[in-house]
Image: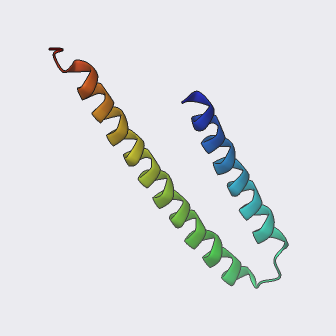
Amino acid sequence: MRRAFSFFIGTLIGGIIGAAVALVFAPSAGEDLRGQINDRAQGLVADIRQAANTKRIELQERLETLRAPRA
């Protein structure tokens, strides 16, 4: 479980760094570049929220399973 979480965090950080480098070196006008950065940042925030919600639901289900009385 911990290895999967570490992999996910590493992938996320690598993606952020890669996207930032690509945007910095891409030939675009300043206004276009700012719009692209804003769009990608909003997409990234949405992806992070979705991943957090998915993990929260998974952990809540596991907690309910652990709290259930054993027969």
Task: Out of 44 and 51, give the one closest to the viewer.
Answer: 51
Left or right placement of residue 2 versus residue 33 in this view:
left
- Does residue 29 sit above or below 53 in this rendering? below
Percent of width and height locating residue 10: 69, 43
Residue drawn 32% across the image and 41% down it: 57
**In the visual, does 4 lie left or right of 25?**
left
What residue sits 42% from the left and 54% below the top?
50
Considering depth in this image, is 59 or 37 the residue closer to the camera? 59
Residue 10 vertical position relative to residue 67 in the rendered view, above or below: below
- Residue 71 is situated, as x and y percent measured from the top left of the image, at 14, 14
Residue 44 drawn at (x, y percent): 55, 60
Indicate left or right for 66 with 53 as reference: left
In this rendered view, identify the residue nearer to me: 40 or 65: 65
The number of numbered badges drawn on the structure is: 0
Q: Looking at the image, is 44 positioned above or below residue 60?
A: below
Residue under the point 57% across and 36% down: 5
* Outermost front residue: 71
Residue 23: % across, % down:
76, 70
In the displayed structure, 27 sits above or below 64; it is below
**Quadrant position of the N terminus in the picture:** top right
* Res 66 → quadrant: top left
